[in-house]
Image (tube, rainbow, N blue to C red):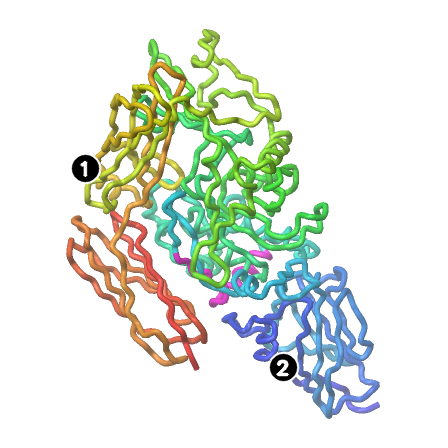
Amino acid sequence: PGIDLKVTGVDFLRSENCRLHRTDAYNINNLVVRRGQPFQLQLNFSRDLKADDKLALRFGIGKRPIRVRGTPMSLDPRRDEDFGGWQISIVRSSGNQCVLSVTSSPWAPVGKYTLNVKTGNNIYKPENEPIYLLFNPWCEGDVVFLANEAQRTEYVLNDTGYIYVGSAYNIHGRPWNFGQFEELVLDACMYLLDKSELKLSNRRDPVFVSRAMSALVNANDDNGVLLGNWSGKYSNGTAPTDWIGSVAILQEFYRTQMPVRYGQCWVFAGVLTTVMRCLGIPSRCISNFNSAHDTDENLRVDIYLNEYGEKLDAMSFDSIWNFHVWNDVWMKRTDLPSGFDGWQAIDSTPQEQSQGLFQCGPCPLKAVREGDVYLPFDSKFVYAEVNADKVYWVVKKVNNEDKFIKISTETRGIGVNISTKAVGQNRREDITAEYKFPEGSEEERESMQRATSFLRPSGLMPRAHFASTVHIDEKGSKYGVVQEPVPKTEVLKEVVPKSGLQLEITNKEALYPGNPLELAITVKTSAPGKWTINLVGSCQLQSYTGKIQASLGYIKETVNLEGKSEIQIPLTIPADTYMSTLATVEDEVHIHVTAIAEVQGTEDKLTKETSMSFEYPPITVQMPETAKLNKDFLCAFIFKNKLNVPLGNCKLLVEGLGIFKMAMFDEGDIEPGRIIKSEIICTPTRLGEKKIVAKLTSTQIKGISVEKAITITA
C-alpha cells in the first residue's frame, strides 16, 4: 500500500462563503454560515488523492459531541449520502487538492461546530475552527424563512434602528445601535445558548431558542445579561437612559459573565433584538403605547384618583405604562395548529413569571388578535397588555374611611399606536392592526368575547389594597364591598354622556425645562340645555411606568355652559415647582395631566388623562456626507443650551458602528447660552450607509439624542 494520506491544511474559503451566506459583516475570524445552504471547503493533502483513499468529515456540536441524530456527523464525500439531513459532495479534485461542498440540514441545531477530517487512521483538526452555524431566513426549508428580501434586510441584517418612546400622542424614535456584527457579540450569543442549557434537539427550534433568550436577557433567575432597575437611582451602574445601543452591554456581559447594570424595557428589547438578529431569527422592536400591566388577567386596570384628580399610586395593583417595548420574531409554529405562523411576541423585561421563570413568549400575534388566548406561550399576558379596559375610581374620605366612587370606564385607551421601525425607511410604522381588529368592529367584539371566555371572570369591584374592608358607593350598600357580577362574556361599555360632555388637555407653550408649564383643560358640551360642571384638574410628574414622582398643582372650578359651547381653563405650573424633581430622579419623566368633570344634576362623569414630554434643544452633527473606506474624517457634535437653566454634569455619548467605537465626552456644567463642541476622528471600516448616534445626558435632562447617516465608498 502507498504512503499514508494525511491532510496538511483546510481552507474555509471564508470570504466567498461568508459573502454567499450574508455573514461577511461579523467581526470574527471564524467561518460563519447559515443552515440549509451549501458552503465550500478546500482540503490539501500530503499526496495526490486516489480513488480508494478513505476520507470523512466529522462535525460535532455540544460539550461532549454525542450522537444526536446526525451529530457528530461523519460525512463521506464519495458516498454523496444524506446524513441527518446534511449533504456533502466533491466539487473538484486535482492532484493533492480537493474542494468539497457541505450543506447542513435546515433543521440542524444552531451553534458552534467542531470539524475533524479523518483519512485512514489519521485525524486532522483545522485551525480557525469552530464553525458557527446560524438560522437561515433565506432558506425555504428553514422554519425562520422570510420570503421578502427587503424585510430580511431590515429584520436580520440592519444593525441600527429606532425604538419608539414618549407617549401615545407624542411619539419619538430613540436611535438604537443593535450592533449584531460587532466584536464579541456573536460569541456572547453563543455563550447565552450554552448558558440556556437547552437540549441540542431544542437548539434547532426558534420557538425554544427565542423563549430561552427572553429569559436570559434579564438577570432574574439565571444571572442573565441585564439587571432591571426602575428605582430612579443608578449611581452604582449605568442609568437605563444612558445606553445608546446593545454592543457595550453584550461585550461587558461576555467579558465579566455577570449581569450588566441597568436596564428598562427599551434596553431589554434592544438587546433581545440584537441577540435574535445575530443568531439569524428575524426580529423587530415593538412599542405599545398605554400598555396595561395587569397582574390579574382580569382585563381591567383600576385607576384611583383623589378628589383633585391626582393619581394614588399606593392603592393600585396594576399600572399603565406610557409605553412598553417588547419584540416580535418571525417563525413557523410547528408546535401549534396551523395558521399561527409568522410574527410572535417575546418579551425579556422581567414582569411576571411564566413556567417559573421571568420569560415571555413566543406568542403568535394572530392568537392575540383573534382572542385565542389559550395558546402558548403567555398569550393571556400579551392580550391584556394591548386590550385591558380602564376603570377610574375617586377615593373620598367619609367618617375617616375610604369611600370608592366609580367615575368612568374607558375601553379604547389601552394598546394604541403600536409602533415599529418601517422596513427600509427611517420612519415609524403603525402595526396596531396586526395586534387587534379595529376598535368597535364586529371582529373586535367577537375576539374580545372569545378571549374573555378563557380569562378569569371578575366582578366590577375595585381591587385596591385592603379593598375587602372598605365601603363602596356603587349601590349605596352598607355591607362593605358590593360586587356587580359581570357575566363571563359581557364586555365593558362606555356610557355616552347626555350633555355631550368632552374634555381636552393641551399645552399652550412649548414644554421646555426651566420654563413654566402652560397647560389648559378645555370643557365642551354639545347637547341643548344649561349645564353646570364641576371640574378638577391636576398635574403630576411620572416616569414612563406610570409611577408618580411629584404632584405639581391642581385646579378646582365650577363652569357653566349652554348648548354647544366650550371653555378653556388654564393650569400653569411654575418652573421651580418641578425643576428639583427633574434633578433628583435619574429617569426621563413625563408631564401627566388628569381631569375629572361631573355635570350637576346628571349622571354624567368623565375622566381624561394625557402624558406629555418635555422638549429639548437639539444636538447638531457636522461631517461630510460621504467618506472613503479606511480614510479618516472629522465629525463634530455641537450643542447650545437654549434653556434658561444650567445643565449639570453633562455627558456626550457617541457611537458609529463600522466607523468608531463608543466614546464619552465629559462636558461638565453647561450654563444657559453656552455652546459646546466635541470632535472625534473617524476611520470607516465597512462599506455602505452607516449611522452615527449621539446622546447628551445631564442631571436635569436624560434624553437628547440625534443620529446622522454617512455613505462609505471604496
Q: Quadrant of residue 692?
A: bottom left
Indicate whether residue 487 is drawn in magenta. Answer: no
- SS at mark 2 in the image: strand
The answer to whether residue 597 is visible is yes
Furthest-top residue in this view: 478
* Residue identified by numbered label 1: 574
Question: Which residue appears at 48% of the width and 8% of the height?
Answer: 479
Viewer-proximal residue among 427 and 48: 427
Amino acid type, callout 1: Pro
Q: CA distance from mark 2 to mark 1?
A: 71 Å
Q: Nearer the viewer, residue 278 or 590?
A: 590
Percent coordinates x, y for residue 517 in the rendering: 23, 40
Q: Earlier in the sequence, mark 2 or mark 1?
A: 2
Residue sitting at x 73%, y 75%: 57
Residue under the image location 37 percent in, 12 percent down: 401
x then y, percent, for residue 396: 35, 17
The stretch of residues the image draws in magenta is: 175-194
